[in-house]
Image (cartoon, rainbow, N blue to C red):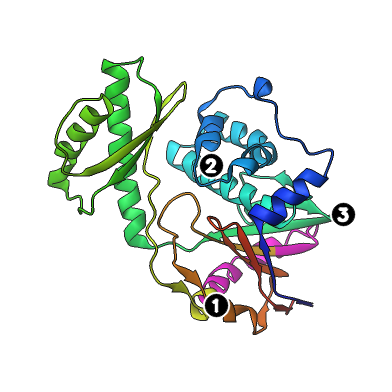
Amino acid sequence: MSTKSNTTTGAKGGAERARKKRHITHSSPKLMKSSDIKEFILNSHEIIKEQQNFVLRKIENWLHENELSNNSQQIKNQNKKELIDFGAFICSYNIEIEIIEGLRESPDFIIALNQKRIGVELRDFCRQDEIRKENVLKMLFDNVEKEIKTVNPDLTGFFNVSLNEIILDRKDYLPFKTELFKKICNENIETKYIKSIRQSKSSKLHIYSGQGYCVGGITSDMILNAISEKEIKLNSYLSDNQLDEIWLLNVIGGLGTSSDYSYIDKSLTKNDLTSCFDKIFLFDFFRKEVIELKVNNKK
């Protein structure tokens, strides 16, 4: 089976299709109940404003189920990231997609489209150095949040922290937390680590960093390695006889900086790939661009 390469820009294609479908409407603000998850999405600068409510509509039930689960906070955060990435992909690629099963593994999602039951495996293009940096920052931000909630429980808002180009060693953890605490509490101090803090309204307190780092590009070797890694698990997907197709979705630049790349080599779309996956996608989260690669299916 063969598929043709296809590029879709979500800001134009997804939003335009959404307006044409009468049964899909943006949620009324009066119906939006406050929660950490919803406010995070609605205040996230990574998602185009006109798409926010649509993305939320597609994934909100799964976000609630994730928060109510007994999983560790680390797993909940990973699940939340995957749901937001996948919701943005749906908005950019095909708004008719409905999630049948989320919060699962092998594959990560089961969806319904064109009367087909399709398994979708999601993969991040990650840089290990940035993953470590993000984990350290998340730990430090969480520590400061807890301290602020203890001494100043009335302080709320989303605080987007931009950092100077300084490598944080262990010796920097304590002075960094002290500096961040004082800046968020609006103390007038000289800063070593923090470049700026942008605050937006929220009924909760949340500290995060939204700045991105772009290096290098996506090459054909990287794509082939990604396919090979995921095809190892493919037998477990194929054992589910109820699946009509299996897709591989590679997310570039999702929520988090560890998967940011400066460009995608468009020559990747010129050559056919032989794979057991029925469709293989590259999804640029920030540009809202979907590239569907040519696949010769070998199942």
Rendered location of residue 14, percent (x, y): 71, 52
Circle 1/circle 2 CB separation < 8 Å: no
Q: CA distance from mark 1 to mark 2?
A: 27 Å
In this orientation, does residue 95 appear? no
Label 2 packing within 10 angstroms: few (<14), some (14-19), many (20+)? many
| Residue 80: assigned label | 2
Assign a secondary structure to mark 3. loop
Examine the image and state in which quarter residue 6 appears. bottom right
What amino acid does circle 3 point to? Gln
Query: Which amino acid type corresponds to the residue marked 1 in the rendered image?
Result: Leu
Toward the bottom, the furthest residue is 271
Quick check: is 279 in the magenta stretch? no
Kind of residue indicated by mark 2: Lys
Q: Which residues are magenta?
A: 224-246
Quarter occupied by the N terminus: bottom right
Query: Badge 1: few (under 14), some or many (20 or more) residues near its Cα, within 10 Å?
Result: few
Q: Position of residue 18 (x, y in %)?
A: 76, 46
Is 92 on the left-hand or right-hand side of 46?
Answer: right
Q: Which residue is mark 1?
A: 224
Q: Nearer the viewer, residue 206 or 47?
A: 47
Q: Position of residue 105 (x, y in %)?
A: 60, 52
- Mark 3 and mark 2: span between their CA atoms? 27 Å
Q: Earlier in the sequence, mark 1 or mark 2?
A: 2
